[in-house]
Amino acid sequence: MSTLLNWGILSTGNIAGTYAKGVARSQTGRVVAVASRELAKARAFAAEHRIERAHGSYEALLADPGVQAVYIATPHPQHLEWVMRTALAGKHVLCEKPMTMNLAEARTAAEACRASGVLFMEAFMYRCHPQTAKIVELIRDGALGRVELVQATFSYNRPFDPAHRVFNKALGGGGILDVGCYPVSLSRLVAGAAGGQPFLDPEHVDGVARIHPQSATDVYAAATLGFANGIIAQVSGGIGLWQERVARIYGSEGWLHVPEPFILDFDGGDSKLILHRHGASAPEEIVVTAPPLYTTEADAFGRAFFAGAREAPAMPVADSLGNMATLDRWRAAVGLAYDADKGQ
């Protein structure tokens, strides 16, 4: 048996290239094939990333006997189809976030992977990073006392282009699904850690959004999440507004400042958490040293694969389903629906 997991990459967009670079530095895997619907694009991607085989269709990648696991990097609305087809082909699945367009699709995708006996993980790369594990450790060790409030934001400003996938409704555009999923994920992780659980789903979800009059997708949005253990989270995300990408976690004995919660160093190195304890003369800086961000993701998946698992501890399937449920409720609160929601 090979000591490395053989990856295929399905699609050749920017995030696919980022992941290929991460796998190239991993300890558990290697990329052996890539697919695009245009063979020329697949060949160019393969040449750039020194990948052995290029396929001119997604179907050809799934038929490649040398591919054991597939990283799905298509636009959101295509996730369900290719998760299911990948699982049916007997390949293990790492699918870009959001897992699907809504909870109903996510349940269908999860069941397809379970029925086929393949490993599935949603690609929330920050969840695989040691900094995130350190945040959980501090909360569980009581460094903040009783956790009471979480604030988390992921937002950027892209000039409006109705054809670009982040604005195009047919391609799943909008800030909630593209980046709002991150602060929701982190808030649910923190709320769970505060109670000794892997995650916790909110009881209450309220939200507002600015919906673009032309694209009918959310340009930026905010939500308040209320959890059964009393924790409140204030989250925001956007594709057309610069906001500070940051997280702050407030407790009865202090608060934690996370200057960069999500997009940690692509090349690896040090990240920093700043712990403010009540009564301390100065905040405490906690440095976390880690491999490249997407390398940690590839290795989290690879370790689960070699352990014979069907889920990865860093991002279990139930957590992905809970995140999709919360995103559904946020979208419902702001009146944002997609074609995939019809009949749900």
Image (spheres, grey):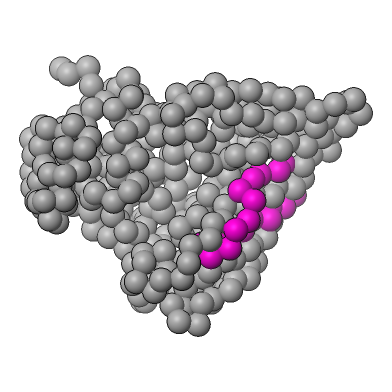
- In the picture, measured across the screen, residue 213 lies left or right of residue 134, that is left
Q: Is residue 124 above or below residue 1?
A: below
Q: Residue at x 33, y 24 (%)?
A: 26
On the image, the x and y values in percent for residue 111 come to 30, 50
Q: Is residue 228 magenta?
A: yes
- In the picture, measured across the screen, residue 48 lies left or right of residue 286, that is left
Viewer can see residue 64: yes
On the image, the x and y values in percent for residue 266 come to 44, 34
Q: Residue at x 48, y 67 (%)?
A: 159
On the image, the x and y values in percent for residue 21 come to 32, 33
| Magenta residues (range) | 227-249
Q: Is residue 82 above or below residue 308?
A: below
- In the picture, measured across the screen, residue 224 lies left or right of residue 58, that is right
On the image, the x and y values in percent for residue 107 come to 36, 55
Quarter of the figure that contains the N terminus:
top left
Viewer can see residue 104: no
Q: Nearer the viewer, residue 336 or 204?
A: 336
Q: Residue at x 80, y 28 (%)?
A: 283
Q: Nearer the viewer, residue 134 or 212?
A: 212
Q: Is residue 72 above or below residue 132?
A: below
Q: Is residue 251 magenta?
A: no
Q: Quadrant of residue 164?
A: bottom left
Q: Quadrant of residue 5?
A: top left
Q: Is residue 214 above or below residue 159?
A: below
Quarter of the figure that contains the C terminus:
bottom left
Q: Nearer the viewer, residue 71 or 99?
A: 71
